Amino acid sequence: MPLDLDLKKLRFGTELLKRGFAKMQKGGVIMDVTNAKQAAIAEEAGAVAVMALERVPADIRTEGGVARMADPLKIAEIIDTVSIPVMAKARIGHFVEAQALQTLGVDMIDESEVLTPADPFYHIDKRKFEVPFVCGARNLGEAVRRIFEGAAMIRTKGEAGTGNVIEAVRHQRLINQAIADLKKLDDAALNRLADTYAISYCNLLGDVRSPGKDAEKINGGEYVFEGGRLSDICEGLVDVVIEIKELSRLPVVNFAAGGLATPADAALMMQLGCDGVFVGSGIFKSENPKERGIAIVEATTNFDDPSVIAEVSKGLGDAMKGLEISEIPADQRLQERGW
Amino acid sequence: MSVKVGVLAVQGAVQEHFDILRKALSSLEISGSPIGVRKLEDFQKVSALIIPGGESTTISKLLQKNSLFDPVRERAEEGMPIMGTCAGCILMAMEGDQAVAKTDTQLLSLMDMAVIRNAFGRQRESFEADLDIFGFDDTFRGVFIRAPAISRLWGGCSALSTFEDNTVMARQGARFALAFHPELSGDTRIHEMFLEQI
């Protein structure tokens, strides 16, 4: 059967291809753009990819309303304009937006808390897609769950649209410390940790059976997520946790995102162990987007060379104004979305 | 004498080449280690250079910003073994296609060949396939990620592997260009072949 032979010879959408794509982005800067003109500027500035979206997070914050996947027409325009990869955001749990983005030819999908979440119980089952996903995480538990669901890249959530790097630093430090702690755990303790991480998958059943109470009474044989029993989820999570212990890092690429606005912010996140950076509102909400973009690209590559950081930071004009995190009401913090 | 093998480390999959180089060095019983090349002083320490996968537009710009573009060309002239994979394959070429021209990507022009960027399509069209490579007894697992293809070869450049009418691996003296990622499939044979050029 020639068809069988061909299928054996050629394989698409494998884990190796998804994680491999993310690896090619390492040491690079991925920039948010809202139209083809900005995308061209980002490419000229040296971005490794662009994130196509309707409004940058800073505007989503000011304008309010429900934030959704960008207009496919706009995404197609951006795809036609640049030769670097184009990423786009889908709402948390909105697998149909993700299917549409995959069809459009988007190279990576960001299941993003910057958009309004679409599902209160679940994130997208990313294993079902051929294109890779990046997902936000505030801590190791979130990162492990997203990797289990098939994410090929993890980024800090930070607090998008603020121009304030403190939350991205918080999330990266929490992940780093949790990995350091995890290395001291034996197999039994790793299993218990995975069990804790699995509880969030029981929220739907918990709400149905005992509204308002914790979901801890679900037993291991019950189906909780995408045809998976709770015991399967625990096993899947423990595999990820063991891999993290062996590698002393996440098994997928780990980028920084959420509030980065300057070359020094990018270098700070790189020195904290990130593999690359996303800059959202920080570039096109600043006075000189192209110059700032170039400077952030150079700072990301030369993150451990203070003389380069000092040099490229000179005379860039005003950065985006930014927001103090404590001034944002808790229910308007984007990082609280998802689990 | 311990040999230092450089991996250009301005952007892209650097660590993956380190890992496979270490395995290849030990299987050839060569005393040596991979080092990242980001500045001229790093480059002066190495006996060979790998230009990894990443984004060719970005890598080309940073090669120039970090004052490595001309030194790499000069050392290549002197015979230094250089291997470019994926984005690195594009940079090795003499000629690019429209996508390369449009982005004003400066090529190192180290091999007599022309390349097409993203020749097989976007990420959704990325694939794995078994390749026949000249001089290898068994096939090699090729990992193609938004991969380029070598569309034409001339002069001293010859094809080592083709896939569906595209050249995906070429050689010119001690210089190699690969459209795929030999650092991702866990097979050390290509890196061993490269190390034997030192």
Image (cartoon, grey):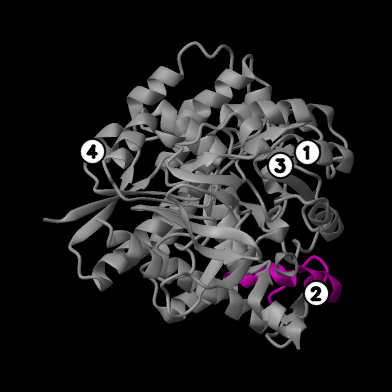
SS state under label 3: helix
Percent position of residue B154, x then y: 51, 48
Q: Which residue is mark 1?
A: A80
Q: Which residue is mark 4?
A: B44
Work out whether mark 3 precedes mark 1 in sequence or the reverse, and give the earlier one: 1
- Chain letter of mark 3 equals A
Label 3–label 4 contact, CB within 8 A: no
Tell me if residue A210 is in the magenta stretch. Answer: yes
Residue plotted at (31% across, 68% down): B23
Answer few, some or many: residues within 10 Å of disc 2's Cα (few below 14, many 20 plus, some between 14 and 19). Answer: some
Residue plotted at (66% across, 72% down): A11
Distance of label 1 from label 2 (alpha carbons): 44 Å
Check residue A334 in the rendering and tell me which mark sits there, or answer none: 3
Q: Could you confirm whether marks 3 and 2 are on the same chain?
A: yes
Residue plotted at (59% across, 29% down): B104
Q: Name above or below for residue A330 compared with residue B28.
A: above
Check residue A205 in the rendering and tell me which mark sits there, or answer none: 2
Q: Could you confirm whether marks 1 and 4 are on the same chain?
A: no
**Number of numbered labels in the structure image:** 4
Of A133 and B119, nearer the camera is B119
Of B12 and A287, nearer the camera is B12
Percent position of residue B54, x then y: 52, 47
Based on the displayed image, in which of its 4 quarters is residue A99 positioned?
bottom right
Answer few, some or many: residues within 10 Å of disc 1's Cα (few below 14, many 20 plus, some between 14 and 19). Answer: few
Q: In the rendered structure, which segment of residues is drawn in magenta? A: A196-216
Q: Amino acid at mark 2?
A: Leu
Work out whether mark 3 precedes mark 2 in sequence or the reverse, and give the earlier one: 2
